[in-house]
Image (cartoon, helix red, strand yellow):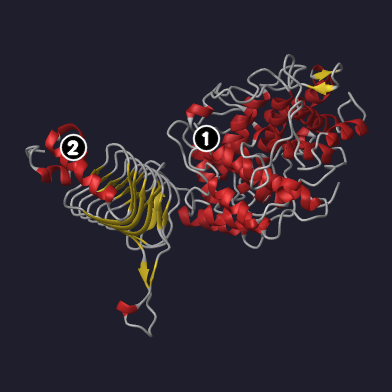
């Protein structure tokens, strides 16, 4: 750029130069420009390092700009615009209506994102037609070329590239490279240019994915493979053709050949069953009559429940330290009859929050799951309804859902939903109302209307952990709601895209960094969504094969599985114990079922991680 820095039009048209080259006077003028926006009539928030050109026409009802985002010269921005970090609205671009941009969205000059529309009924002149707005949503890391038009109602997934002059009239999935009028998907951005495509190309893949679900609805048994090719053998593909084999890795390497993997599964299951009684005895404390997660730990309610789950999986019986009736009596006695909640040993009964569960979640919220399912495995149930949830009204529930920390603590929000929905399930199963009339319907209505259509999830990524909170929260939320009640999840293909992207994050999945929570919270959403679609099934199986091979190596002789490392200090750590063992046994089943070889294990989860919807009757 040859223009002198004192020429204000330089920064209006090239805002990326402002941070390094602007004078003190130009910085002061930009600060004043932003102050006027913040003091204006609209709801405005501007992150660090933002720039708004002097010549841009910015008249918003809502304007949220993330850090380092800018609006360049002669842009026209109105209505409700929300942009993440590192977004660029370049010169002469029009962004109007309801438009939401993720992080790193780059919009070329002279483009238009029009998140509104006029009616066209024949009985009114055009200028009198009502204005409607479905909104435009653009994912993370998207490049929109110059002179592109995006019309109302369109969702553009993560990592897309839109060629110059395109007119985008329909949704584009993640990783699309699209061009034309109307825009069509040309290729997957991850494919090298000129790469040889599979027979039939994109259209054939789309037909296979659509045809695989045609007329099937939601299967009565979620654990049964949804694709005939999956049950035909480990090497069968969802489309019926040959696959790369279960050992094919995402990075191009191989883990184990099919025969070797099935032999390893069978050998593992036999060894685990032979050692199950000993590892349970290792965590039993006769002096207190309670279980600990691992030697040296304090007794916990969860440890008793994990022992029941492990015994059911590996022994097909109750833990041998007590007769079945004694297990039932001890677990039922833990419930507070007034609230229906279960405190930790030695703790006071928790106070219910305005929507039933304690505000801080805590052990009592998880005990709704683990004690309820342990009793179920023992052929019993809670002694009392979970009154704290039974009395929750729809309006109180909706207010609580809206107040949960979805933005930065989506796992905690999802865990709260899981516990509330599970309490409602136990109440309904006991023959009463799940909650106050309309509350359960309000839960699913709120979830459907607040899901993000381009991730299929609730919550947002964070700078510190990426998609970890969002994906892990998705697992907890859908486990207790959609999966437990036997309902299909919304936007299944978008979920798969989001989860597979997350599964490549080396912060959480580099060798030696995996833990039970993070692996479970990837494989369960992939497994659940595979009941509805064959989308990216080869990649799902490749990831599952690698994780399964690694998981089998984590077993400690006579001690079980360790939970694994957790950077935030949560979880029991690397030492083998009951929680790690219960979780990894369920994970291994899910991984194996994705590969079509779960029968080799000789067990099937029936508790918290059961594949089928929870029944409404005992048994």
Residue 452 location, x and y as percent?
Answer: 49, 51
Residue 494 location, x and y as percent?
Answer: 51, 49
Rate crowding at label 2 as few (under 14), some (14 to 19) or many (20 or more) other CA atoms within 10 Å.
Answer: some
| One can see residue 223 in this view | no
Horizontally, residue 371 falls left or right of residue 500, namely right
Horizontally, residue 537 falls left or right of residue 6, namely right
Which residue corresponds to mark 1? Answer: 468
* Residue drawn at (38%, 63%) of the image: 152
Task: Examine the rendered structure and indicate whether residue 276 appears above or below residue 175.
Answer: above
Which residue corresponds to mark 2? Answer: 17
In the picture, the quarter occupied by the N terminus is top left
Q: Nearer the viewer, residue 539 or 289?
A: 289
Q: Nearer the viewer, residue 279 or 549?
A: 279
Q: Nearer the viewer, residue 2 or 372?
A: 372
How many numbered marks are there? Answer: 2
| One can see residue 176 in this view | yes
* Residue drawn at (59%, 27%) of the image: 255
Instruction: Please tell me the numbered disc located at residue 490.
Output: none
Q: Secondary structure at mark 1?
A: helix
Rate crowding at label 1 as few (under 14), some (14 to 19) or many (20 or more) other CA atoms within 10 Å.
Answer: many
Task: Examine the rendered structure and indicate whether residue 359 appears above or below residue 42.
Answer: above
Q: Nearer the viewer, residue 233 or 371?
A: 371
Q: Secondary structure at mark 2?
A: helix
Horizontally, residue 151 falls left or right of residue 206, namely left
Residue 246 location, x and y as percent?
Answer: 62, 35
Cα–Cα span, label 1 and label 2: 34 Å
């Amino acid at each position: 750029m040859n223009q002198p820095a004192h020429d204000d039009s330089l920064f209006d048209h090239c805002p990326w130069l402002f941070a390094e080259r602007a004078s003190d006077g130009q910085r002061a003028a930009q600060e004043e420009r932003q102050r006027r926006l913040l003091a204006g009539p609209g709801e405005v928030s501007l992150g660090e390092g933002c720039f708004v050109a002097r010549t841009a026409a910015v008249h918003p009802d809502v304007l949220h700009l993330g850090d380092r985002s800018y609006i360049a010269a002669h842009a026209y921005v109105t209505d409700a615009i929300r942009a993440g970090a590192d977004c660029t609205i370049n010169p002469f671009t029009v962004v109007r209506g309801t438009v939401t941009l993720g992080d790193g969205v780059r919009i070329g000059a002279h483009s238009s994102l029009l998140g509104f529309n006029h009616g066209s009924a024949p009985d009114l002149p055009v200028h009198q037609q009502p204005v409607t707005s479905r909104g435009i949503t653009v994912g993370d890391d998207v490049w929109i070329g110059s002179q592109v038009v995006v019309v109302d109602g369109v969702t553009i997934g993560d990592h897309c590239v839109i060629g110059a002059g395109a007119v985008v009239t329909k949704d584009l999935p993640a990783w699309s490279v699209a061009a034309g009028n109307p825009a069509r998907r040309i290729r997957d951005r991850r494919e090298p240019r000129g790469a040889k495509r599979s027979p039939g190309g994109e259209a054939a893949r789309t037909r296979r994915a659509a045809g695989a679900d045609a007329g099937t609805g939601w299967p009565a048994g979620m654990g049964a493979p949804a694709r005939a090719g999956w049950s035909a053998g480990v090497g069968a593909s969802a489309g019926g053709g040959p696959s790369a084999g279960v050992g094919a890795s995402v990075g191009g390497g191989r883990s184990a050949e099919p025969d070797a993997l099935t032999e390893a599964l069978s050998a593992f299951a036999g060894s685990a069953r032979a050692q199950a009684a000993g590892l349970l005895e290792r965590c039993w404390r006769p002096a207190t009559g309670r279980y600990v997660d691992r030697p040296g730990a304090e007794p916990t309610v969860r440890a008793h429940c994990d022992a029941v789950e492990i015994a059911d999986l590996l022994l097909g019986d109750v833990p041998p330290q007590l007769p079945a009736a004694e297990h039932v009596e001890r677990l039922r006695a833990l419930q507070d009859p007034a609230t229906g909640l279960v405190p930790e040993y030695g703790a006071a009964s928790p106070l219910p929050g305005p929507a039933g569960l304690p505000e801080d979640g805590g052990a009592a919220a998880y005990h709704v799951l683990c004690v309820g399912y342990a009793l179920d495995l023992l052929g019993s149930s809670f002694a009392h309804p979970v009154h704290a949830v039974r009395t929750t009204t729809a309006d109180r529930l909706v207010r609580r859902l809206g107040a949960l920390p979805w933005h930065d603590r989506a796992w905690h929000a999802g865990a709260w939903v899981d516990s509330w929905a599970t309490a409602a399930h136990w109440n309904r199963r006991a023959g009463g109302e799940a909650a106050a009339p309309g509350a359960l319907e309000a839960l699913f209505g709120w979830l459907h209307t607040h899901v993000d259509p381009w991730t299929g999830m609730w919550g947002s990524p964070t700078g510190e952990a990426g998609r970890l909170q969002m994906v892990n929260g998705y697992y907890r939320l859908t486990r207790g709601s959609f999966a437990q009640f036997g309902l299909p999840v919304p936007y299944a293909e978008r979920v798969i895209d989001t989860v597979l992207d997350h599964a490549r994050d080396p912060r959480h999945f580099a060798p030696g960094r995996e833990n039970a929570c993070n692996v479970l919270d990837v494989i369960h959403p992939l497994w659940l969504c595979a009941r509805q679609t064959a989308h990216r099934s080869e990649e799902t199986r490749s990831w599952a094969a690698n994780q399964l091979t690694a998981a089998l190596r984590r077993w400690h002789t006579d001690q079980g599985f360790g939970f694994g490392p957790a950077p935030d200090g949560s979880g029991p750590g690397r030492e083998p114990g009951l929680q790690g063992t219960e979780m990894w046994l369920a994970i291994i089943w899910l991984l194996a079922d994705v590969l079509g070889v779960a029968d080799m294990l000789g067990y099937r989860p029936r508790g918290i991680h059961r594949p089928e919807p929870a029944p409404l009757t005992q048994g």
